[in-house]
Image (tube, grey):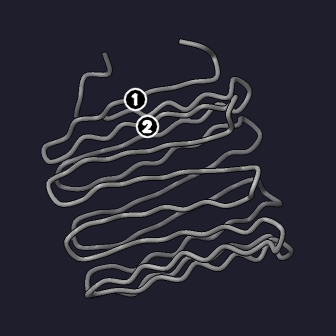
C-alpha cells in the first residue's frame, strides 16, 4: 500500500468498522456497519467543511465545520440527548459537554501544551483521548464491556493506524 493510505478493518461482537485515509485527495471516509447503525464521514478540506451523518434507530448526527469562522458545531437530535460542540480557537480551548441519562463528556484542548484530553464517564465505558504534539502521536483508548481501541497517528508519514485489542492485529 502507498504511504499516504491506510486501511483498517475492525470486527467486534456487534459491528465492523472500515477506515480509509487518502491524504493525496485530502479526503477521509469512515464507514461502520453494525446491527442498528451506519456511519459515513466525508471530509472535504478544500471547502473547509466536514459532514458526519449517522443513521440509526434513535439518532441522526450532522457535524459541520467552518474553518474560516473558527467554529465547530456538532448537533445530535435523538430521543435522549442533544449535543453542541463549540470551539474557540483564539482562546486555545475546546469544550465538548454532553448531558444524558447515562453519561457526561468533557473534552478540553490546550494547544499551548500540545495536549488533548477527552474524558467520558458513563455506566459502561470510560474514554481518554490524549494527543502529544511533539511526537505527533494520538492514542484513543476505550474501555467498555465489548471492546478496547487504540488509535495512533503519525503525522510525519501521513498515516493512520487503528488497533483493536479484541482482534488479532494480523
Quadrant in the picture for the C terminus: top left
Q: Secondary structure at mark 2?
A: strand
Residue under label 1, please give it: 8
Relative to the observer, which residue lies in front, 64 or 110?
A: 64
Residue at point 78%, 60% (across, down): 111
Using the rendered view, name the quadrant where residue 39 is placed.
bottom left
Which residue is situated farthest in the top direction here? 1
Q: What is the crowding at mark 1: few (fewer than 14 residues within 10 Å), some, or many (at least 20)?
A: some
Query: Which disc is residue 107 wearing?
Result: none
Relative to the observer, which residue lies in front, 169 or 75?
A: 75
Residue at point 32%, 47% (across, down): 32
> With respect to residue 167, does 121 lie above or below?
below
Q: In the rendered structure, which disc, 2 or 1, sits on the residue that comes first in sequence?
A: 1
Using the rendered view, name the quadrant where residue 36 is placed.
bottom left
* 158 sits left or right of 79 in the view: right
Which residue is situated farthest in the front direction here? 47
> With respect to residue 151, does 59 lie above or below?
below
> With respect to residue 36, does 108 lie above or below?
below
Relative to the observer, which residue lies in front, 54 or 119?
A: 54
Q: Separation of disc 2 and disc 1 at Cα? A: 6 Å
Residue under label 2, please give it: 19
* 30 sits left or right of 13 in the view: right
Residue at point 29%, 73% (across, down): 122
- The percent position of residue 4, horizontal first and vertical second, equals 64, 23
Q: What is the crowding at mark 2: few (fewer than 14 residues within 10 Å), some, or many (at least 20)?
A: some
Amino acid at each position: 500500500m502507498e504511504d499516504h493510505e491506510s486501511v483498517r478493518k475492525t470486527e467486534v461482537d456487534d459491528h465492523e468498522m472500515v477506515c480509509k485515509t487518502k491524504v493525496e485527495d485530502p479526503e477521509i471516509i469512515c464507514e461502520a456497519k453494525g446491527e442498528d447503525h451506519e456511519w459515513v464521514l466525508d471530509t472535504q478540506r478544500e471547502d473547509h467543511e466536514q459532514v458526519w451523518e449517522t443513521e440509526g434507530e434513535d439518532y441522526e448526527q450532522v457535524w459541520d465545520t467552518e474553518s474560516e469562522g473558527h467554529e465547530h458545531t456538532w448537533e445530535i437530535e435523538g430521543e435522549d440527548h442533544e449535543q453542541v460542540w463549540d470551539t474557540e480557537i483564539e482562546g486555545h480551548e475546546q469544550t465538548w459537554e454532553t448531558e444524558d441519562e447515562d453519561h457526561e463528556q468533557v473534552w478540553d484542548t490546550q494547544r499551548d501544551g500540545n495536549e488533548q484530553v477527552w474524558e467520558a464517564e458513563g455506566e459502561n465505558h470510560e474514554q481518554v483521548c490524549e494527543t502529544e504534539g511533539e511526537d505527533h502521536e494520538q492514542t484513543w483508548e476505550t474501555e467498555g464491556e465489548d471492546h478496547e481501541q487504540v488509535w495512533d497517528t503519525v503525522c510525519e508519514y501521513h498515516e493512520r493506524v487503528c488497533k483493536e485489542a479484541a482482534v488479532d492485529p494480523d
